[in-house]
Amino acid sequence: MLSPSEVDAKNLSILSHSRLDNYELLDVYIQGVLAFIPGGLGGLNIVDIADPLNPTVISSYHAGGCDWGRIYSWTASGDYAYGTGRECGVHVINISDLSDPTFATIYSDESQSDQRYEHAETDGATLYLSKHQLGIELVDISQAPFLSALSNISTHNAWASLVADSTLYIADGSAGIKIVSVRDLLNPELLGSLATSGTAKDVALVGHYLFVAVGAAGVDMIDISDLQNPLFVNNYNTSGYASRVSANASRIAVSDWDDVEILTYDDQGMTLAGYKDTGGRVMAIEMIGDIIFSAEWEDFVVFNYGEIQGPDIDLSTRKIEFPRVHAHGALTRYLTINNNGHTPLEIIEAALDISDFEIELGDNMVAPDSSVSIPIVYRPGTGSWAEGLTLTTNDPDELGIEITLTGNYPSGPMVGDMAPEFELEVVNGLGTISTQELFGQPVVLAFFTAW
């Protein structure tokens, strides 16, 4: 079945797709032809990005003393790089020899026992450290690796900051943005503030416009012509959770959790101009000209922005999970394949090795700006409960795409099973609640975690 797609050609092609030395990629900081990429399992990858088709890891660093070597953000100035590790402080390393970064020291504010170092920003001889409820700490790095505290800016929940022309722009969580003069580093002065559409997580600045990643609410565009009276211009609500933004004179790149989105803007606001879902978990992003660098948890992906002349495949999902299907039963789920390119997309092959899953391909051509929904049937038998479906297409940058299919788990409960008996403590209250009290009612058990 063919149906018109709601989007035009979406302008993002994949140049390279790499696994680095350290995993759980959380951010991207670019200096010249170098990318400093923190690893949740490791600490740091230093990557040569001079050739976007072939990013090369120059070296890596493990942050000893942090759980799993986890570092959340890096910045660099001169011969030193600074990595924020929340409660394990700021790792300072010597990068004068990029092939062999060496530990120099760990910095933390000795006046506070509980640290929350989230994001680092450098400007000349000053390091700006975002510490959530503990504010923005200004640190003198002119004598690095010997660091000394200068002052602290009070915040509600500082996630990140950006400095330009002696002005610091702060993404202050649910409090929105703060604009602070740091002309006098010992006495920062609050100039202005503005509530945002959602939780302010990151900021980018071009001219007199500030772009703010506001989580589930997408991206806010703010006019800062008058620093004391910033004005809301427009919000673009992205499809996922906007955690990082990068901007240039015409575009904004957004790391949106489940995809990369590109927005264009003018004085009236922002519109969608590109997107790509690689199946990774998009954590952070940087853009240099037409090249977009994306940290996607397990992978480092490089994109090129520009009109795509050929076919361009996008999928509704890269993982299809079936609920419990009992013996001799069958259940159908659908995979939607979009062609956001200018020429027909050919599905050359849909390969499955396990007899428990079946795919009914039908028409193997998808017209430009159209989509096709393909039924996938699960009949549990003697095969594997999990399998990879490989789609081979004529999309030049995604010739083969893997979709994970899962059926009946070999052990443990899953959707479709009878709920086991349980008793849980009442949150923020006294006593417990049990299945007997909940019988016959719809129940949602919500689990939450955050980076």
Image (spheres, helix red, strand yellow):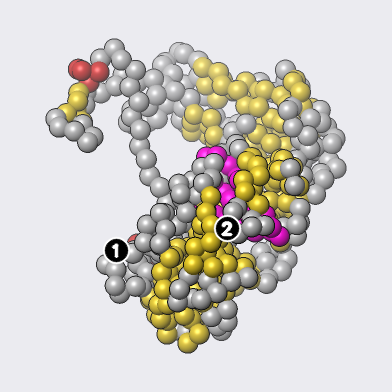
Q: What residue type is labelled 1?
A: Asp
Q: Which amino acid does label 2 sit on?
A: Gln
Residue 314 in the image: above or below residue 420: below
State the residue in front, 327 or 369. Answer: 369
Residue 273 appears anywhere in the view: yes
Q: Quadrant of residue 55?
A: bottom right
Magenta highlight: main SS: strand
Sort mark 1 into few (<14), some (14-19) or many (20+) by Cα contacts within 10 Å.
some
State the residue in front, 387 or 139. Answer: 139
On whether residue 217 falls in the magenta region, the answer is: yes
Q: Using residue 329 as the reference point, say whether residue 390 is left or right of it.
A: right
For disc 1, the marked residue is 114
State the residue in front, 298 or 142. Answer: 142
Label 2 SS = loop
Q: Position of residue 105 (x, y in %)?
A: 39, 80
Range of magenta residues: 201-220
For disc 2, the marked residue is 228
Q: In which quarter of the image is residue 295?
A: bottom right
Label 1 SS = loop
Q: Where is residue 209 in the image (x, y as percent from the top left)?
A: 67, 54
Taking the spot 19% from the left edge, 25% from the top edge, the residue there is: 433
Sort mark 2 into few (<14), some (14-19) or many (20+) by Cα contacts within 10 Å.
some
In which quadrant of the rendered image does the N terminus lie?
A: top right
